[in-house]
Amino acid sequence: MPWPHGLPEARTFLRGALPGYTHIWVATDAGGVRGMCTLRGNYLAQLFVDVGYQRCGIGTALLDHVLGHTTGPIELHTFEANVNARAFYEKHGFAAVAFGTSPEESQPDVLYRLDPQR
């Protein structure tokens, strides 16, 4: 499910949301930003890769970087309908541990956890 808003809305969201994160990483190349992820403690709050650059290893590189900066279990939420994200996380060892509804978007979501014994 791609980001449903334009760049100005994304900038506003990120300016308001990012100050509480403990780590923020951005993947770039000569053409610009290709992906980003944010970590709050051991909670992976966001992992985005530009749609045109998905399946090129950027998400895996960002996730590997996150794994190198955490010691305990890592948790994240994704929309239940986001089958690509769910497949990505499951491919990397995450397990679905709970199903619920996102409080912000009121959409069905899934809580994933990666055991520290990875």
Image (spheres, helix red, strand yellow):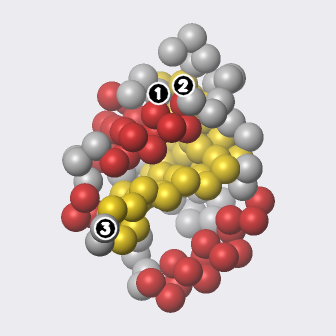
- Relative to 98, does residue 62 appear above or below in the rendering? below
* Sequence-first disc among 1 and 2: 1
| The residue positioned farthest toward the right in the image shown | 20
Q: Amino acid at mark 3?
A: Ala
Q: Residue sitting at 33 percent across and 28 percent down? A: 91
Q: Which residue is mark 1?
A: 94
Q: CA distance from mark 1 to mark 3?
A: 32 Å
Q: Residue sitting at 55 percent across and 30 percent down? A: 67
> Do the CB atoms of the residues marked 1 and 2 lie less than 8 Å apart?
yes
Q: Residue sitting at 61 percent across and 72 percent down? A: 14
* Sequence-first disc among 2 and 3: 3
Q: Which residue is mark 3?
A: 30
- Relative to 68, does residue 28 appear above or below in the rendering? below
Closest to the observer, 112 or 7: 7
Q: Residue sitting at 52 percent across and 84 percent down? A: 9
Q: CA distance from mark 1 to mark 2?
A: 4 Å
Label 1 secondary element? loop
Q: Amino acid at mark 1?
A: Phe
Q: Position of residue 60 (x, y in %)?
A: 37, 39
Judge left or right: residue 15 versus residue 68.
right
Closest to the observer, 107 or 16: 16
Q: Amino acid at mark 2?
A: Leu
Q: Which residue is mark 2?
A: 114
| The residue positioned farthest toward the front in the image shown | 30
Q: Position of residue 2 (x, y in %)?
A: 35, 66
Q: Position of residue 13 (x, y in %)?
A: 61, 76
* Sequence-first disc among 1 and 3: 3
Q: Position of residue 94 (x, y in %)?
A: 46, 27
